[in-house]
Image (cartoon, rainbow, N blue to C red):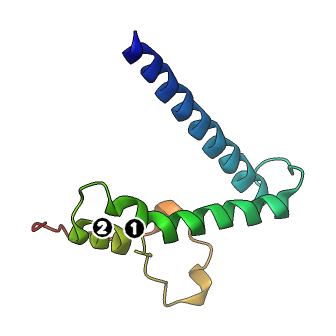
Amino acid sequence: MAGTSQSVRKMLITLGIALVLLSWAAYALSGAGISRPLPLLRPTFVVITVAYLLRGLAGPFFLAGTGRSSRFITILLLLGRIRPAKSSTLHRKAKTWCALKFRWTPVLAF
């Protein structure tokens, strides 16, 4: 019986996280002008930005006690900071995300 209550709790937490991320996606589309304007657009962007900044800054501290190695945490942080290379020509600024070319190098030793 205790296992069922734990799985329901985990399901509700996951559903809550999914709903938050879905609402953030709706605000992102609204901010990009793809969907209708949503209320409190600018303050919501500030809240979303602060949430991601806190997650990024506090992430290593939360991962430290989970049994993961410091090498894994460092690689994870570095991978989170990969950005696509900028185009050398100014007339190509309107590239979409699917037109960007990424070059991934596999990391074999952990």
Mark 1: amino acid: Pro
Q: Residue at (28%, 71%) from the top-left corner?
A: 75
Furthest-right residue in view? 39
Which residue is identified by label 2? 73
Give the CA distance from mark 1 to mark 2: 6 Å
Mark identifier at residue 83:
none
- Looking at this view, is 14 or 103 the one in front? 14
- Left or right of 87 on screen, residue 106: left
Measuring from the top left, give residue 91's x and y in whole percent.
61, 84
Can the viewer see residue 21 in this picture?
yes
- Left or right of 27 on screen, residue 80: left
Query: Which of pointers 1 and 2 lies earlier in the amino acid sequence?
Result: 1
Query: Eyeballing the image, is 17 above or below 1?
Result: below
Q: Residue at (24%, 66%) from the top-left corner?
A: 72
- Looking at this view, is 9 or 25 the one in front? 9
Measuring from the top left, give residue 108's x and y in whole percent.
11, 66
Mark 2: amino acid: Ile
Measuring from the top left, give residue 6's x and y in whole percent.
44, 23
Can the viewer see residue 96 in this picture?
no
- Left or right of 71 on screen, residue 73: right
> Callout 1: helix, strand or loop?
helix
Which residue is identified by label 1? 60
> Callout 2: helix, strand or loop?
helix
Measuring from the top left, give residue 37's x and y in whole percent.
87, 51
- Looking at this view, is 13 or 5 the one in front? 5
Q: Residues within 10 Å of mark 1 (few under 14, many from 20)?
A: some
Query: Do the residues under discs 1 and 2 have CB atoms within 8 angstroms?
Result: yes
Query: Eyeballing the image, is 57 above or below 68?
Result: below
Query: Eyeballing the image, is 70 above or below 27?
Result: below
Image quadrant occupied by the C terminus: bottom left
Question: Residue 12 occupies which quadrant of the picture?
Answer: top right
Furthest-top residue in view? 1
